[in-house]
Amino acid sequence: MVLAAVLPLHPRASTAVLCGWLLAAAVRGMRERAWPRSGFPRPLVAGPIVFYALHVLGLWSSDDGAAGLFALEVKLGLVAVPLLGSWEWARWSEADRARSGRWLLAAFGGGLALRVAVSLLRQTWNWMETGVPELTYAALSHPFHPSYLALYVTVWWILARPSLRASGSVGLAIGLLQSRAGLLVAALAAAVGAFERSRRGLAVLLVAGLVSGTLGAGLLGRLRIGEPGPASGTGSTGGRLQAWTAAIQVVRAHPFGVGTGDVVPELVAQYEAAGADYARVRRMNAHSTYLQTAVALGYAGLVALLAWWAAVARYAWRRRNLAAFAGVTAIALHAVVEALLELQQGVVFVAFALTWFAVAAGYERAADAVSDPA
């Protein structure tokens, strides 16, 4: 519960929680003199661990060992979250498991609300002092990337079935964050939700919030004073196209991957050769989880990633947990345009969502559906 609550507060907050959780698990294991039992379905735990193990192997083919070790450190949550969560889940009673989804979503939603409220208060105060209305994009999401925070909010909306008012607030927040990926995935979630009668009103309010937030962000942009214009004609979308093109070229040249630590140097070499100055100056990664994985680990790594996420989606679908299935789909779609596993704010969230949220959200309803297929 603590990890769910602190995830949206600060990217580094999860580190302290995971360290404390690991210490508690070690102490408990020594007291009981027994290896912890695994409670989560095996594919949900094995998938991220195999994916991480491939990155460990990829370190041996990396010229930049320091960058490779840093990448392994960032991705350590892919091992810690599933293992610790699985051990904890095994200790819970059926009654606790049935309640866990509501607890987790309430904790995560509370953390999100606090994060956005603090950012709004801070930037409103700054507006009063400077006269510059910075209430959108990175100013609103700080210290998170806007795209990541938009994903957090969208997944919460899918799983939590919030009130109408909360649904509109979610859309407003995503609109103000101005993340194109966030807007697209949230709009798709609303479109799919509209097919379910009980969610139709929520979907309408979500879309209304998205439109209002987007229009509000545009209005606030016009009110800004003294804001410098863009340095070049290439924006974030053009930069992504440069990154994707370069990543595809690298994968073609290195079908087995360039190694865990050599992704950015190889991409930068491609940027220089193609004259892609926007991506070169910013030393952009592949800006796609799938392409980033393929560049580092080759086709084998890409297959491992797809197999992991497909296993989670299959688990949710077989348990008729459509909300969890939609949550996995939202993450998979977002991963097309963001390298979600290159920052801790993405790693821990994805690992948490694809284990705890996938298993716990709707656990009681899913268990009923499995036991009573009629």
Image: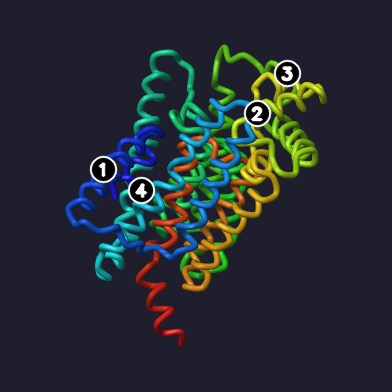
* Nearer-the-camera pick, 216 or 304: 304
Residue depicted at 27% across the width and 40% down the height: 20
* Nearer-the-camera pick, 269 or 99: 269
Residue 55, compared with residue 92, is above or below; it is above
Say which amino acid is labelled 4: Phe
Residues under labels 2 and 1: Cα distance?
34 Å
- Dot 3: within a 10 Å radius of its alpha carbon, few (fewer than 14), some, or many (20 or more) residues? few
First along the sequence among labels 3 and 1: 1
Say which amino acid is labelled 3: Ser
The residue identified by callout 1 is: 23
Say which amino acid is labelled 2: Val
First along the sequence among labels 4 and 1: 1
First along the sequence among labels 4 and 2: 4
Tell me if label 3 and label 1 are in contact, CB under 8 Å.
no
Residue 278 is left or right of residue 364, and the answer is: right
Q: Return the x and y of residue 119 as percentages of the image width and height.
A: 39, 30
- For mark 2, give the secondary structure: helix
Residues under labels 3 and 1: Cα distance?
50 Å
- For mark 3, give the secondary structure: loop
The residue identified by callout 4 is: 108
- Farthest right residue? 274
Q: Nearer the viewer, mark 3 or mark 2?
A: 2
Residue depicted at 30% across the width and 40% down the height: 17
The residue identified by callout 2 is: 264
